[in-house]
Image: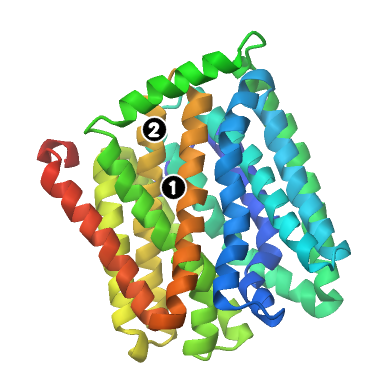
């Protein structure tokens, strides 16, 4: 169909793996903030829980980048997926409060292995259009959102949470095998048995020197501000719907599914846009859209209904998708000869931004409330975007 953007085989396989990984995880993760509050955690502690997932992801990413030189990235991706299965098993078996936090760290390390390795495969492959490929890759979570929460709700209703965790384990086992058999051959050219730690350090030094360039760093700052804002929503959006808008769990479930179904055709249009857009322009425009829509969302919080929440968050998520795809495309092209280190740096950005966003918003919500936190987050993003727009050459945004 002419409406569906082109997708290369390597991108399709990586996107399918990403979809099934998140499908298995999102069967229960939608309810995670509600689950934490039900267990007696305060709002700041909810932020800490997310920090314990995303901070280890960021810290372990450079190690995963080095391992990608020594071990086929498809194998490391599969190991990371198996870590998700182990996490679901831990949620069944572990009841101790302290060990609960340990399993969040384990999930973060597993996610680092997966995301660094899968990005290494994409960045190390001669892609036709990197922004388009990452547009496909980053759209996978929205496709999973369309059906995973509904499937998860059915299993929770029929078999309690044990049933949904078992389903998650089965899905992740399947995904690990699919990843290994589909991506092992195209990824094998990235391994280098003679690669040493010193070589990795030299690559990072080279990358950090280039990151300081005016054509790269300001746009990464925009992307990071959008990721901070994403942390606000990731940790507290569902709680906002439940506590401030007084939505039932069933209505929240319907909202997530309708949102994702609507986003599917929109994602095709966004990917087609990414095919033709400059990466820097995508980051700039996507960040501006995400920031402005968050401000509107917070300001309108007293007048929101189902359809207005849906419209605002579809547009905000569209801006975030454009910004994130532009960032990964920019990093991929800028450091084409160092895909392992580039993928590690790109992976660090996302979890670190989301983790800090969740932590900061958790500390602020008690003082300002949900709506003001969403407004402040949006204002921060818009300010960063405007500062970059003032100091960066206009030709780079065309």
Image location (x, y in percent) of residue 385: 23, 53
Neighbourhood count class around disc 1 (C-alpha, 10 Å): few under 14, some 14–19, many 20 upward = few
Query: Relative to the observer, which residue lies in front, 68 or 272?
Result: 68
Q: Which residue is mark 2?
A: 331
Q: Quadrant of residue 368?
A: bottom left
Furthest-right residue in this view: 93
- What residue sits 36% from the left and 65% below the top? 316
Mark 1: which secondary structure?
loop
Q: Which residue is mark 1?
A: 4
Query: Relative to the observer, which residue lies in front, 202 or 253?
Result: 202
Drawn side of residue 320 relative to residue 359, left or right:
left
Image location (x, y in percent) of residue 205: 41, 22
Question: In the drawing, what numbered circle is on residue 367?
Answer: none
Q: Quadrant of residue 361?
A: bottom left
Verify CB contact (< 8 Å) between mark 2 and mark 1. Answer: no
Furthest-top residue in this view: 194
Query: Relative to the observer, which residue lies in front, 372 or 30?
Result: 372
- Give the answer, above or below, for where 297 lies relative to 385: below
- What residue sits 59% from the left and 88% below the top? 248
Image location (x, y in percent) of residue 98: 77, 63
- What residue sits 79% from the left and 67% below the top? 164
Q: CA distance from mark 2 to mark 1?
A: 25 Å
């Amino acid at each position: 169909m002419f409406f569906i953007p082109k997708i290369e085989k390597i991108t399709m396989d990586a996107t399918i793996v990403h979809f099934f990984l998140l499908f298995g995880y999102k069967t229960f993760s939608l309810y995670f903030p509600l689950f934490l509050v039900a267990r007696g955690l305060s709002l700041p502690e909810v932020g800490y829980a997310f920090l314990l997932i995303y901070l280890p992801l960021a810290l372990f990413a450079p190690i995963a980048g080095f391992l990608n030189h020594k071990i086929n990235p498809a194998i490391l991706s599969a190991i990371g997926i198996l870590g998700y299965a182990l996490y679901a098993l831990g949620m069944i078996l572990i009841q101790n409060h302290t060990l609960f936090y340990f399993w969040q760290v384990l999930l973060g390390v597993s996610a680092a292995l997966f995301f660094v390795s899968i990005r290494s495969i994409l960045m190390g492959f001669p892609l036709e259009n990197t922004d388009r490929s990452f547009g496909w890759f980053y759209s996978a979570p929205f496709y999973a959102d369309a059906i995973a929460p509904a499937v998860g709700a059915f299993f929770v209703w029929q078999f309690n949470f044990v049933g949904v965790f078992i389903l998650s384990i089965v899905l992740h086992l399947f995904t690990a095998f699919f990843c290994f058999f589909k991506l092992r051959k195209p990824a094998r050219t990235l391994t280098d048995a003679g690669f040493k730690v010193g070589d990795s350090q030299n690559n990072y030094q080279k990358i950090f020197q280039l990151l300081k360039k005016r054509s790269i760093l300001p746009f990464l700052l925009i992307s990071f501000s959008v990721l901070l804002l994403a942390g606000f929503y990731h940790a507290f959006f569902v709680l906002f719907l439940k506590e401030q808008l007084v939505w039932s769990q069933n209505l929240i479930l319907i909202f997530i599914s309708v949102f994702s179904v609507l986003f599917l055709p929109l994602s095709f249009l966004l990917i087609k846009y990414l095919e033709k857009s400059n990466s820097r322009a995508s980051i700039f425009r996507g960040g501006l859209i995400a920031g402005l829509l968050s401000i509107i969302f917070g300001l309108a919080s007293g007048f929101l209904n189902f359809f207005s929440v849906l419209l605002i968050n579809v547009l905000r998520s569209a801006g975030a998708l454009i910004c994130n795809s532009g960032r990964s495309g920019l990093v991929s092209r800028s450091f084409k000869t160092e895909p392992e280190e580039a993928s590690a740096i790109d992976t660090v950005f996302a979890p670190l931004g989301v983790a800090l966003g969740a932590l900061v918003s958790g500390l602020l919500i008690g003082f300002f409330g949900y709506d003001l936190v969403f407004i402040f987050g949006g204002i921060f993003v818009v300010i960063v975007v405007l500062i970059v727009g003032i100091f960066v050459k206009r030709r780079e945004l065309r």
